[in-house]
Amino acid sequence: MALKVKKVLIIRFSSIGDIVWTTPVVRCIKQQIEGVELHFCTKKQYKSMVEANPHIDKAHYLKEKIGPLIEELKKEKFNFIVDLHRNIRTAMIKFRLGVSSKAYDKLRVKRFLFTNFQIDFMPNCHVVDRYFEAASPLSIKNDDKGLDYFIPEKDEVEMAWLPETHQKGYVAYVIGATGWTKILPFKKMVELCDRINRPILLVGGKEDFEAGDKLEKFFNADAGGPEMEAGLKELGKKTVIFNGCGKFNLSQSASLVRQAQVVFGHDTGLTHIAAAFKKTIFSIWGGTVPNNFYPYGTKFFLLENTKLDCRPCSKSGRSKCPKGHFKCMNDLVFDFYLPE
């Protein structure tokens, strides 16, 4: 029997991709429980993602200390808490609020065995579906409409703002990620961009600008003069790059991803935002694996080296390859096809 609730709190503190993955649960609770008041709790740096979501009635933000947040939440008199983060902070919140709750299963033991010993007991179940299990006492059902991302009107990027080379269409490449082992080495980025052979718009944060600038300059035909430009044209080379990393905020970058013809991306937030727009995604994997974390609810192709017995080497990326060879990225073969 479903719980009768009037006020529900969802907690997910971070990060971009994980918060996007919560959106089907948010939508289904709001649309399937009549008259429910839905609140969402996250870190303050993700405010723009939450405040634009029309299914969320009120948001609460973790700033520096947990105490003030708990006092704020206690005043709301929630009936139920859906814990989609499950850590010590969410445990403190649930204990202090003293209301019914359910947390999603992080499968810690199974993930430990998988990432440390490559022993795979992981279920064939996307994390979004595990989030729905945490909301099971509310008897909501997945409507299978996929992920949501809402872009404020002020952050919509017009094609006319882009270089002329990109105004008639482009491929978006999300070049960053948290964790060195989740990112292609520069020489493989060059190989990928050459294989794409279309105008490419690089999207990412300020931390990705340097790599993006290097790529942009590498493919700059003007730097080689008219002879190089003519030679590239003769060879059928069409790769021209605009580096948008660090030049746009998150929602503006999402707007650029939404307008792309197709999207290439590492295992990172903007790639999962692309899934919310039902883009065709070429999803690039290195030290992590896509078993529970592939692009959700959209058409995708996996670019990964499946011939190694050392993957995955971590759950969220490492600062270096533990084997020293980084074959998961260095030996990656780009055998995809992009129709004209």
Image (spheres, rainbow, N blue to C red):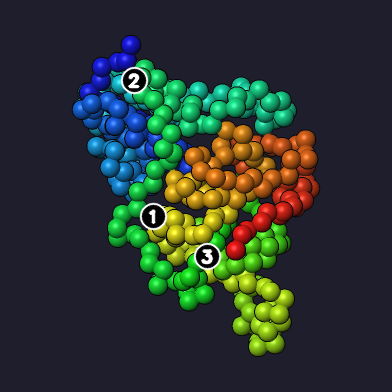
The kind of residue tagged 3 is: Tyr
* Camera-side residue of 167 and 15: 167
The kind of residue tagged 1 is: Ser
Q: In this view, does 263 lie above or below 194?
A: above
Mark 1 crowd level (few <14, some 14–19, many ≥20, 10 Å Cα): many
For the residues bearing labels 2 and 1, Cβ distance under 8 angstroms: no
Residue at the extreme bottom: 226
Which SS class for mark 2? helix
Q: Which residue is drawn at 41% across and 68% down?
A: 159
Mark 3 crowd level (few <14, some 14–19, many ≥20, 10 Å Cα): many
Gap between marks 2 and 1 measured at Cα = 31 Å
Which SS class for mark 3? loop
Gap between marks 3 and 2 measured at Cα = 43 Å
Gap between marks 3 and 1 measured at Cα = 18 Å
Which residue is identified by label 2? 138
For discs 3 and 1, the disc positioned in front in the rendered view: 3
Q: In this view, does 69 lie to the left or right of 23?
A: left
Which SS class for mark 1? helix
Instruction: Choose top left, top right, bottom left or bottom right for residue 161.
Output: bottom left
Q: Can residue 50 be seen in this view?
A: yes
Residue at the extreme top: 1
Q: Residue at x 61, y 22 (%)?
A: 109
Q: Position of residue 73 (x, y in %)?
A: 26, 29
Q: In this view, does 131 lie to the left or right of 111?
A: left
Q: Earlier in the sequence, mark 3 or mark 2?
A: 2
* Camera-side residue of 279 and 172: 279
Which residue is identified by label 1? 251
Q: Which residue is drawn at 30% across and 60% down?
A: 154
The kind of residue tagged 2 is: Leu
Mark 2 crowd level (few <14, some 14–19, many ≥20, 10 Å Cα): many
Query: Mark on residue 263?
Result: none
Query: Mark on residue 170?
Result: 3
